[in-house]
Image: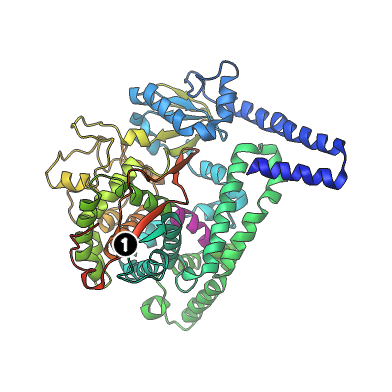
Amino acid sequence: MLSYFFSTCTSCLDVLWNTSAVAAAGIALTVATPVLVIIPLQLHRISLAPEGILWVGQDSYSFFPKLRSTLVALINERQNLEEGWTKYSSKGKPFVRPSLHWPSVVLPPSNAEWLARQPENLVADSKVQDDVLALEWLASGPSNAFIHDFTVIRRDLTRQINACIPELLDEIRHACDTHFSHGKDVGDGWQEVLIVDAVRKAVCGVANRVIIGLPVCRSEEYFHAVQKWWVCFGLTGLIFRSFIPGPLRNIIMPILSVPTWYWRRKVAAMYEPEVSRRMARIKEAHVKGDGLKSRSEERANDLMQWLIEQALHSSDPAERNPRNLSNKLVMFNLFATHTLTTVLTTLFTTLLTQKDCKATLAALREEALRIVPQASGTPTLAKQMPLHDSVLRETLRLHPSFDDAMLREVVAPAGLTTPDGFFLPQGSHVAMHTRLMQRSDWSGDGQDWETFEPFRYYDMASGRQSRQSNGGTSQTSGDDATEEEKAIALPIDKGQISAVQISDRYLPFGLGKHACPGRFFAASTLKLMLASLVLEFDMEAFPEDRQPEYIEFGGVKLLKEHTVVRMRRIKADSKYDKMDDVQ
């Protein structure tokens, strides 16, 4: 695509000016840009890597190995991490991973808890977020603290999970009718569903039902605007962190950020009037002495409402500005919908490629039958889905969304020394490996941790397997969740290890105080979506000659857009039966 783009541009220039000099200048500029900008930038970043720690990804290069491995790092990311795991991490040693963004030190698993405990003034998480996501340019808010404040997610969203379940289930039912059945009713037979597109649209609606509410969450125009904002945000961030030197950012980024700003404004403008209206109602109720919180029938139960109520307690007028609040709600889409889409598509393809697919779906449907029809009226029932929770945890263990986790930058002026004696100077970037670490047998219990066992954690809690996990000092070690948060999200069987229980051997949500604050909501939503879909549809396992295909890029594995899942609507008279005849 890029080669076609550049060749087309060159042809246009040749036609317009018909001079070989212009064409030659264009070619020279194309060649000179990486030589004069990108290569010096990468050489500078390579020079910042700590000394005394070995690099991976260099075996194929006899000269300039660090530079050459860095320039191809995006396509070799997984290969480099696998090499590092085999040679170093599995033996308790760190290694340097080449990257266009920065060469990062991947610490061994024994350092995970130590890294999680480091204070922000020594090892910074927010600085890495700013660099990776280009938040200074692509986010919007009166201050950096405002942009990084996720209190409303950690506190309000987690506390209100049960109260949100009726709305979630209503939106999931709408998604089943709209995005998965495509208007087909029971008895219409099998249909082919583009699973990535269907899940993406469903997740956007379900997540935004809790972020901004009806009717915008169901708007096609809103979905497409969010999609365009995602793409612009992601591509701009990639270019920012990989190819633009610091001194040039003030020149390039105001131009490069324009598409992202445009689509963010388009998205936010669709519900900014509602933000202003709700703020006016709260102020009016306050003037009348009639607290809106006491009138639940007039108070929405979504992130927009909670964010407004939090903002009205701020002394900073800019934090109460409806536009700033609307822009912040746009950012919640990045953390909610994109992550949920990736996990749910991975979950489905993993289930539908395992050998016992039929029996697994039957067991999930039987559990869903006991819970989903009654969950709207009794939301606490949604916690009583240990089979679904086990499937989710096993999917996240075997196929985490990213191959690395806990990205940090050493900001201590004097640097930092790891427990193993390796010195990390100021400016060093560190991370933990997740995928192969979570597939390793740390406990020596003889289980096969390389394979997908959907009910592994349910069986462990039921005593049919060892009660040990695949290692770790404890299953809640490093988990800074409050007791209230844990009580909300843990399965009803307290002996089962929940999908949201993080440890130094289970890092899909990170670890410590910077662990994902929305993991409780994410897990609840994913389980409800899975349960509803297995109740509403039969799903056909992937045949051996048509296995799903993936794109691996930059340490991320994504399902290809053209992946098709065969589904059929379950007969009306058997939708809420056990459905033992899964096909």
| Figure quadrant of the C terminus | bottom left
Q: Residue furthest left?
A: 463
The answer to whether residue 294 is above or below residue 71 is below
Residue placed at 27% from the left, 58% from the top?
Answer: 488
Q: Dot 1, how many residues are within 10 Å of its Cα: few (below 14), some (14-19), or many (20+)? A: many
The answer to whether residue 124 is above or below residue 484 is above
Disc 1 is placed on an element classified as helix
Q: Which residue is mark 1?
A: 533
Q: Position of residue 521 (x, y in %)?
A: 35, 58
| Figure quadrant of the N terminus | top right
Task: Answer yes or no: is residue 321 visible.
Answer: no
Q: Is residue 240 left or right of residue 108?
A: right
Which amino acid, mark 1? Leu
Q: Position of residue 461 (x, y in %)?
A: 16, 46
The answer to if 433 sits in the magenta stretch is no
Q: How many marks?
A: 1
Viewer-closest of 318 and 237:
237
The answer to whether residue 553 is above or below residue 318 is above
> What segment is highlighted magenta in the picture?
328-338
Q: Main secondary structure of the magenta part?
A: helix
Residue placed at 41% from the left, 76% from the top?
Answer: 299
Q: Is residue 266 left or right of residue 380?
A: right
Task: Answer yes or no: is residue 139 visible.
Answer: yes
Q: Is residue 571 left or right of residue 246?
A: left
Viewer-closest of 291 and 130:
130
Residue placed at 67% from the left, 28% from the top?
Answer: 40
Q: Position of residue 141 (x, y in %)?
A: 58, 57
Q: Is residue 352 left or right of residue 580?
A: right
